[in-house]
Amino acid sequence: MADRKPATRRRERKEKEVDVKELKKEEAKKELKKEEAKKELKKVEAPAAANDEGAPAEPGAAGADEQNGDLQVEALELPPFEIITGDRIDPFTYKFQFKNVEYSSGRNKTFLCYLLDDGDAVAGLQRGYLEDEHAGTHAEEAFFTQCLSHCDPARKYTVTWYVSSSPCAACAAKMAEFLTSRRNVRLSIFAARLFEWEEPEIQAGLKALHAAGCKLRVMKPLDFSYTWETFVENEEEALQLWEDCKENYEYYHDKLADILQ
C-alpha cells in the first residue's frame, strides 16, 4: 500500500501551532494543581514555624539540624497515582487527546471510552471512560481490574473500546493473554491513533491481540462523532471535525492493515 502522510507539511505546521496553544492551556491547569499542592504544604509548615518562633516543639519533631537552629519539616506526601474514571470527558480534552494526527506532542495520556454488555438485562449497557498518564497502571489494564474484575465464566461479555491511541506492547501482551484464557469475553478496539506503530514490539503486540480474537480498527470520522455524542460533555453541540481527519484515518487504516496482514 502507498505510504501517505496524514497531511501536508504546511497543514501540519498550522495544526501544531493550534495544538501548542491547547497544550499551554493544559499546562496552565497542571500549574494550578501544583499551586494547590503548595498551599497544602504551607498548612503543614505553618505549625512548625510557630514552634520555631518560641512555642515548645513536640518531642522528635526536630531533625538532626536542630542544634544549628534549623527545624526540619517532614515533606508533604502527595496522593499516589490513580486512574481517573468518569462518565463524560471535557470537550477541550477530547478534541486534543483524540485528534488523529501523526505526531503526539503533549498527548502523554490514554483515554479509554468503553461500552460493556455483560448480559444483565436489568443493568443494561454500561459505559464510561478511564484516563491515565503513563505513570502507573495504564487505562487498558485498569479496565480489567476496575470494570471487569468479576468475570463470570458462565456469562458472555461484549466490550467495545474507543481509545485515543492503540495499546503499548506490555498492555497488548496482557490483554492477549486475558482474551486467550477467557473466551467468553469479546473485545473490539477502535483507536484514534496508532501508538509507535513502527516499533517491532508494538507490531508484535497488535498481532498477538488480533490472534487472540480482538477486533482492531482505526476510528473513522463517524466514530469521532459517535464518541463525541456518547462520552463528551458536548452541551448538545455537534462535533466539528478537524481538517484532514478522513485523510489521517485512511493513513492509519492502511498502516494497521499492513501490520495485521
Image (cartoon, rainbow, N blue to C red):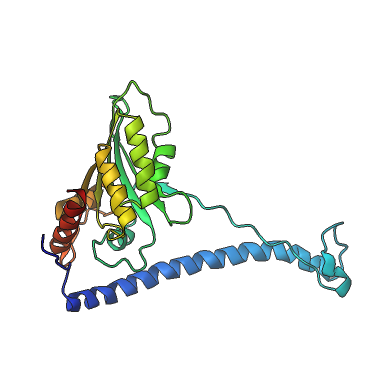
Residue at x 32%, y 54% (from the top left corner)? 202
Residue 16, compared with residue 95, is above or below; it is below
Q: Residue furthest top?
A: 154
Is residue 214 visible in the rendered image? The answer is no
In the image, taking residue 254 as reference, residue 231 lies left or right, namely: right
Q: Is residue 181 above or below residue 16?
A: above
Q: x, y percentage for residue 189? A: 26, 45
Residue 200, image x, y percentages: 31, 56
* Residue at the image point whose x is 34% and y is 43% from the top: 128
Residue name at image x 25 percent, y 66 percent:
102
Which of these two is toward me, 200 or 59? 200
Residue 230: % across, % down: 25, 46
Name the foreground residue: 30 vs 111.
Answer: 111
Q: Quadrant of residue 244?
A: bottom left
Q: In which quarter of the image is residue 115?
A: top left
Q: In this view, does 26 lie above or below 141?
A: below
Question: Is 9 rendered above or below residue 193?
Answer: below
Residue 36 position in % (x across, y down)? 56, 64
Quadrant location of the N terminus in the rendered image: bottom left
**Measuring 67% from the left and 66% from the top, which residue is drawn there?**
42
Horizontal side of 166 relative to 150 (left or right) equals left
Count of all numbered marks drawn on residues in the image: 0
Q: Which residue lies furthest to the left in this view?
A: 2
Q: Is residue 155 visible?
A: yes
